[in-house]
Amino acid sequence: MKKLSILLLLVGLVFGMAAPVAANVDEDRAKALKEIEETNVEINEKIQKAVDKSNELKADYLKKVREIREENEIYQLRDALAETNKKIDTGSKKSDQMDRLKEKSLSLQAKLDEKMGELNYDFLQMEAQVDEVTSALLVADEEERKNLHVKIVSLSASLNETAKMELEETLEYTEDLEKVIQDVYDETLKMSNETIEKAAEKGVHAEQSWRWVQFGDRWVWIDPVRVIGGFH
């Protein structure tokens, strides 16, 4: 009987000691999960701010490009011609109005052809080259931009003033956009790594959960945290 009492006492001590340990483990894991949740909220807020900033940069860039083109007579004539032809295509005007629109279209086309003929270079070919380079710049990574820079230097020598201004705006926009993206990428990666390390110390296994996010004209993988495979 005495031995049984001693055995029961020992069992009671073991279970009595295990209960607080288990409680501490559960508390640590709960803290880790809470930290992951809070980090993800903060990361998402930073991503959204960067997205908003990128959209502002893009809108400002497009506005500047539009203003540059609006000051160029060829673009003015092309826009006016396009708008006139659009009205003709709808065919909703009366016969006399339609005749005036067709006369206006012919007049605008003649003026546009005249202005294009006055240029000492192929305007359409040059515009296509500028569009090709600027489009590539907007989605290029760092290495690709270095290669494009050589083409830009060569192209700039033969550009007219309007195209040069437009290309300069594109270069400035891509540099500003890249900084916004790099800053939020570095900051959120650091946050997620630190949170993952802290979670591991509390027995929670987590990793980056990459998201495909659009910043202006660029798509980038960004890294909130997710729990994978429970506890250890």
Image (tube, helix red, strand yellow):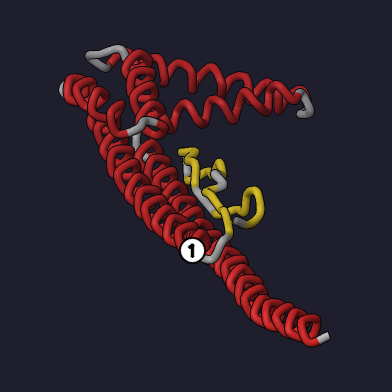
Q: Residue at x 45, y 28 (%)?
A: 77
Q: Quadrant of the C terminus?
A: bottom right
Q: Residue at x 60, y 53 (%)?
A: 226
In the rendered view, tell whether residue 4 sits above or below residue 46: below
Q: Is residue 6 left or right of residue 27?
A: right
Q: Residue 81, position in %: x, y? A: 53, 25
Q: Is residue 166 left or right of residue 66?
A: left
> In this figure, which residue is indicated by the disc labeled 1?
201
The amino acid type, in three-letter code, at marker 1 is Glu
In the rendered view, tell whether residue 90 sits above or below residue 36: above
Q: Is residue 40 left or right of residue 98?
A: left
Front-most of residues 55 and 41: 41
Q: Is residue 132 left or right of residue 220?
A: left
Q: Secondary structure at mark 1?
A: helix
Q: Quadrant of the N terminus?
A: bottom right
Q: Residue 186, position in %: x, y? A: 37, 52
Residue extending farthest to the right is 1
